């Protein structure tokens, strides 16, 4: 059960509601986000909703039995809209595009990427400055200094930044320079990180774990929401299966299922999803048809020379072609 509380209700009123819900044998948790206050009731007891519905300070009660109830679509009338300012939003019925290199490599690369994005009217640039690498000897990112350079150039160009945060201590140092924090597939169940991102007033994109289920992804989002941050997006980026012909197996099913289950925007990452440059485009288009609210992908002026993930990175020419096809596909989907 989710009880939405009225703004500014007194502690006394809140306590009476909690006492009443606990008397009905529900275990309660208080949730306070930047947008509202809720009381979560865990239990499955039969009761007459009118027993609490009349209480002072309640604006709405929803009987939701989903384990991850705050991110469930079952109670929220309007799907979540992520507002990045300057007219940039990520939302259902929109087609948010986020593109850029796997890793930020330096000023020249940032400038070239920004020019490519601007030519194609893309408002959000991706790139890693903290890179989770399978080998400790691979390039691990330029760190916060790289982020600061990127931020300066991106702001001048009116471009928003999405970048991965790998650990709790980075949240604060990155804060002034990011528009969206990305939680990477290796950190989807880093619950301390998720808790801390719940305290931040900036949007968070959570990638699905490498071997994570859809429910586990929703659980990760529930962590951030219940810790205070409703500004969330989910990202399908492929999962590990027995198949070795592709880097991962892009679970297009998950896009349709996440859209059904959750009110949060769902973003597709076909670059990591298949991991093969020549096949990023068809997979990306399929994700749009499956209902994705946005696509995040890797592009680089010279993919062969990229410092990471070059094999799945599109050249600017390929990227431009993809952008055009994505927009057409989106229009087609919306016309149905
Ligand atoms: C990335 O976006 O470059 C990345 C490391 O993604 P993932 O966490 O999905 O592997
Ligand atoms: Mn990558």
Image (tube, grey):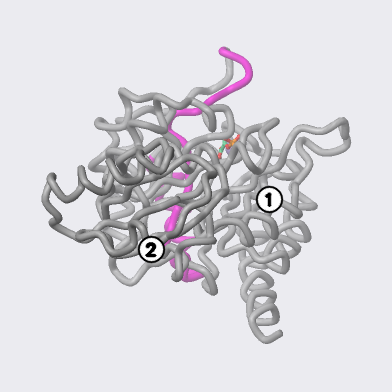
The verdict on label 1 being within 8 Å of ligand 1 is no
Secondary structure beneath label 2: helix
The mark closer to the camera, 1 or 2, is 2
Q: Which quadrant of the structure image shows residue 192?
A: top left
Expressed as whole percent of the image width and height from the top left, the position of residue 83 reads 34, 63
> Is the C terminus in the top left, top right, bottom left or bottom right quadrant?
bottom right
Q: Nearer the viewer, residue 63 or 220?
A: 63
The residue range painted magenta reads 107-136
Instruction: List the residue tagged with mark 1.
Output: 270
**Ligand 2 shows up in which quadrant of the image?**
top right
In this view, 68 is above or below 294:
above
Which circle marks residue 50 in the picture? 2
Q: Position of residue 91 (x, y in %)?
A: 47, 67
Quick check: can you spot residue 143?
Answer: yes
Q: Is residue 118 magenta?
A: yes
Q: Measuring 82% from the left and 33% from the top, which residue is drawn there?
A: 241
């Amino acid at each position: 059960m989710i009880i939405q509380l009225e703004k500014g209700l007194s502690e006394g009123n809140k306590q009476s509601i909690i006492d009443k819900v606990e008397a009905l044998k529900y275990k309660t948790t208080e949730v306070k986000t930047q947008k509202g206050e809720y009381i979560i009731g865990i239990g499955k007891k039969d009761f007459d909703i009118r027993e609490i519905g009349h209480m002072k300070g309640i604006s709405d009660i929803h009987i939701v039995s989903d384990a991850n109830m705050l991110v469930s679509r079952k109670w929220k009338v309007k799907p979540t809209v992520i507002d990045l300012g300057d007219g940039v939003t990520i939302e259902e019925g929109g087609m948010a595009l986020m593109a850029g290199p796997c890793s930020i490599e330096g000023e020249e690369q940032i400038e070239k990427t920004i020019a490519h994005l601007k030519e194609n009217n893309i408002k959000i640039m991706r790139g890693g400055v903290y890179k989770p690498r399978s080998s400790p000897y691979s390039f691990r990112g330029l760190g916060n200094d790289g982020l600061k350079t990127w931020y300066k150039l991106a702001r001048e160009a009116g471009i928003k930044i999405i970048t991965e945060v790998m650990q709790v201590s980075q949240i604060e140092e990155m804060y002034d320079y990011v528009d969206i924090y990305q939680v990477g597939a290796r950190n989807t169940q880093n619950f301390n990180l998720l808790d801390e991102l719940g305290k931040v007033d900036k949007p968070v994109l959570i990638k699905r774990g490498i071997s994570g289920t859809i429910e586990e992804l929703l659980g990760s989002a529930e962590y951030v929401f219940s810790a205070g941050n409703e500004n969330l997006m989910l990202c399908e980026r492929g999962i590990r299966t027995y198949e070795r012909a592709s880097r991962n197996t892009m679970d297009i099913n998950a896009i349709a299922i996440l859209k059904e289950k959750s009110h949060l925007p769902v973003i597709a990452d076909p670059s990591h999803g298949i991991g093969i440059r020549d096949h990023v485009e068809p997979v990306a288009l399929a994700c749009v048809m499956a209902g994705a609210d946005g696509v995040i992908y890797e592009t680089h002026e010279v993919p062969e020379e990229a410092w990471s993930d070059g094999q799945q990175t599109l050249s600017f020419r390929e990227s431009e072609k993809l952008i055009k096809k994505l927009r057409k596909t989106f229009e087609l989907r919306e016309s149905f």
